[in-house]
Amino acid sequence: MSNHKNILASICKVALILPSLAIADGSALPEYVNGKLLVDVEANAVTARLRLPMAVANPDKPGLPPNEVLKRLNEGEKLFVFPGKGDCKLANGSAFAVDREGKPVKRAGDFGNIQATYRYECVAKPDTISVKVFEQLPDIKNLSLQLTSDKGDQTAELKPGAPDLKL
């Protein structure tokens, strides 16, 4: 009986390792389909942090190439829009690939998880945020939101077509 457990454990380990090996040897592309969005709302500023873990792309329907994902994520003014009051403008933002330890990837062509941070300066406290990440990155299917404001913390699961966030 324990021999079957050892075999099953070995199969599980191989199943977990194979996708990483495929990416490492260049035979598969990474894909980004889920993520975490942390939003901090202050009186005259909004900070958004986006974390996208790498997954292995479906070879029958590959997603956007990683370079294109990073390019679109570096256009922060298109990812978050403030349609109500606040008149928020992107002050700074950046997106980059990181390794498993969270350190930026140094060589071109190396891809891993993606981190992005954006800071928006506002004339007044915004009352609404439109999350346009799904429009810019159509492969993303889900974002786990954690929003912090003077009204407290709230969490939600955002999907494509999600309504604006009321603050």
Image: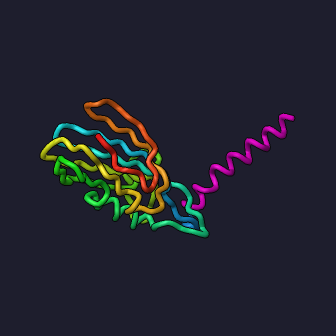
Q: Residue at x 33, y 55 (%)?
A: 95
* Colour approach in the figure: rainbow
- Name the quadrant containing residue 9: top right
Residue 161: x and y in percent read 43, 56
Number of marks: 0
Q: Residue 37 is drawn in which quadrant?
A: top left
Taking the view exactly as shown, the residue that stands out farthest to the right is 1
Q: Relative to residue 39, is residue 32 drawn left or right?
A: right
Q: Is residue 148 left or right of residue 59?
A: left
Q: Nearer the viewer, residue 116 or 18?
A: 116
Say if the magenta span includes residue 116. no
Q: Check the image and report above or below for 48 versus 27.
A: above
Magenta span of residues:
1-23
Residue 121: x %, y % from top left: 17, 47
Q: Name the residue rendered at 31%, 52% in the picture.
A: 130
Is residue 65 positioned above or below 148 on the image? below
Residue at the spot 59% in from the left edge and 61% down from the top edge? 22
Q: Main secondary structure of the magenta part?
A: helix
Which residue is rendered at x = 57% and y = 68% of the image? 61
Corner quadrant of residue 40? top left
Instruction: Indicate whether residue 15 is drawn in magenta.
Output: yes
Where is residue 138 shown, x and y percent of the image? 45, 62
Location of the C terminus (image quadrant):
top left
Question: Which image quarter holds the N terminus?
Answer: top right
On the picture, is 79 further left or further right than 35?
A: left
Q: Extreme left residue here?
A: 123
Residue 111, how many percent across, how many down? 45, 59
